[in-house]
Amino acid sequence: MTGGPARTGGEEPAEPTEPSGPTRPADPPPPEPSPDGSELAGLAALHAAYQRERAGREDAERAVRSAAVLQAVTGALSGAHDMTAVAEVVSRVARTGVGAAGSFVARLHRSGGRFELLGTDGLSGPTAQAWRSMPADRDLPPGEALLTRSPVLVRTRAERDARFPRIMAGPNDDPGSFAALPLLDAGSVVGVVNFSWRQEGQIDVVGVELLTALAAQCAQALERARLYEAERAARQRAEEAVERLRVLQSLTARLSGAVDGASVGAVILSSAMTALDARGGVVYRLDERRGTLSPLASRGRSGPQPGPALPVAASGPIARALRLGAPVVAGADPEQVCIPLVLEARQVGVLCLDVPDGTAVAVEDRAFLDAVAGICAQALERAELFDRAHDTATTLQRSMLPRRPPAVPGLEVAVRYRPVGGRTWVGGDFYDVFALGPGRWGVVIGDVSGKGVEAAALTAVARYTVRAVAPAAVSPAQVLAQLNAAVLDWADGEDRFCTVAYLEVRPGPPARVSLAVGGHPLPTLVPAQGGVRPVGVAGTAIGLVAGATSADVDVDLAPGEALVLVTDGALEARRPDGSWADDLVTRVLSTPGPTGAPAGRDAEEIADRVERAVLDVQAGLPRDDLAVVVLRVPDASEPRPATLAMTLECAPESVARARRRTREFVAAATARTDPDADAAEVAALLVSEVVTNAVVHARTSAGLRIELADDRARIEVGDASPLAPVRREADSDELGGRGLLLLDRLAAAWGVEQSAEGKVVWFEVDLECPEPDAA
């Protein structure tokens, strides 16, 4: 029989094997016994413990995550100093930490009626734009958070649509849940932070506690940033106040050295443009008598340049600011800010500045502009008084000097006069050239003691006494003797005197000169063959003692020879370091001019060279009055020069000087082809207009150059201003404003060229007379 493995001891006996045949189904397992009550309680306790452990573990994990988020936000906020930076950190770092799809931080606008978006992250462009300036209304989550001062939590889309349907009415990112939390500072709502998730129910996943902590953290950071910005703004205002005070002090100091209207206007523009970052500007002074605003200075304007005068009744912002007595802002890019200059409730002018948009409307700027305007108004008032005094002095000075040297047949006469010591002072030097009778001319040059009105009175006594006694006097020495008696009688014991050189000239050639000197520098003879030397005998100054003596000396001037008379302003010139320029006039006259002629090719060139040498050695700042008189006999054998060049000072008298020299030079060149000198008159007229633009309007010195060709004269006037002249239509009652029109009508050609120093205005004039019409 077959059996299974042997049974060992202790084993149960094997079940008996069934006989072979059909298989019988197995019996079901016996049922488990039902646990009793104690076992059920144990299982429940075990499950509860598990749930508590899992909840604790989840809370711990959430706490760790929350701490990590708060720590990350804290670290990022450490580098955020202003409110915008704080909002950007919270929007970006906190959004990432809570797993939100989008976020924004907004603060309550100072008006209280709306929020201002400070920073966003994760929002689409249209959605961010829609939230950029939102109303603080209750039908929006931020508005409700503001009004309730509590978090607004929306967990589902259904809740969203029921509570805030307005969200879906505009651009949105279809949030499934969102939270709007108020930002509270000391119990006041200063803003709101908003998080949104695309999934529903995310608020509970993140945790309300974390969201609330982030809101508190954001509120504290915003408050710190607000305090920082306030402190920085206060510091900036203080620095700006210090800077503006410095500007005002600098303006006051600079204006103290500016006495006339032009220099005051230039200082005002320079200071105001620097302080307000202005691109350009104009200073206008009110002319109450004419009812106009006249420009004193213009700088940096790229648009139309100011005209000669602006009617007070004009409709533009400049005149309107004057009439209103308050600043007027007009235009854009740049803005034009027109500030009335008011002194004791009386308008004296307008300051007009071109500034970048928006920089001129701040209250601080207006207060600063008012302070600048007040200082400028006082300076303009002083300048007005100074200019009146200067006009008076100029009128008095001109009354004591000849308007222009007379034309002396057979003799070239050139004069230069430059008073110093203040433009309201009448210079102490004088000269005169006058006819004594047929073929006889009197020439006098002198220097009186003192300055001002008393010096002017002595000048008048000396000049008109010489004119009165010279025609009947038998010699120059007798003229000086009679002048000495007249000055002593006029001074009446006071210490008043003058030095004088008087000449009687009979033109030739040769020109016969008889001269006497009373204490004055001796005249200098410039022979045609060289050998410059003084002529005459020094006598006694006029008005010091009775019986003053002088000696007559006769000199003949051959063709090409000259006699140069100067005052001590030329002989006593000193360099800026105080050293004397010894023998300056002698050295200049001993040096041939550009054409090789002794001292110069004509009297004008000689006078120019002497004057320029005296100014140059003193760096343009002479310490004493200067008068120069040059008498020269022309030489018919000398070739006619083809070029004339001269420098013109920035002074109104330069216009007359340029006009006279141009007329003489062109007339000499056209004597044969144009007997009536029409070309010379046209050239002189156009030179007058162009030089006026340079020295009066551009307010710079100018260079005049004339080049003669066979049939044309090319004339150039250069100045230091880069601004081209502006064509405009002058009113019928205006005295100026027609310079370019005249160039168009009278010049054969003209144009404007830029130069290294500024610009050159050139024109050409036909030298030949036009042919008469065949008719």
Image: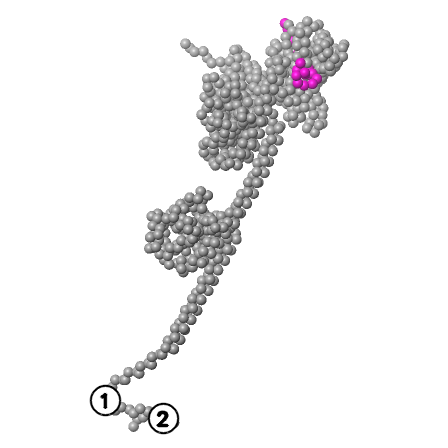
Label 2 vs 1, first from the N-terminus? 2
Residue positioned 71% across, 27% down in the render: 579
Q: Is residue 690 above or below residue 218?
A: above
The residue type indicated by label 2 comes to Arg
The quadrant holding residue 112 is: top left
Segment tinted magenta in the rendering: 438-457
* Residue 394 x/y as whole percent: 61, 17
Q: Is residue 700 above or below residue 449?
A: below
Q: Which residue is mark 2?
A: 7
Residue positioned 60% across, 33% down in the render: 249
Return the mark for residue 681.
none
The quadrant holding residue 422 is: top right
Q: Quadrant of the N terminus?
A: bottom left
Residue positioned 35% across, 53% down in the render: 160
* Residue 140 x/y as whole percent: 38, 49
Residue 558 visible to an observer of this rendering:
no
Q: How far is disc 2 from disc 1 in space, using C-alphas?
A: 26 Å
Toward the viewer: 588 or 620?
620
* Residue 59 x/y as whole percent: 44, 64
The residue type indicated by label 1 comes to Gly
Crowding around mark 1 (Cα neighbors within 10 Å: few <14, some 14 to 19, many 20+) is few
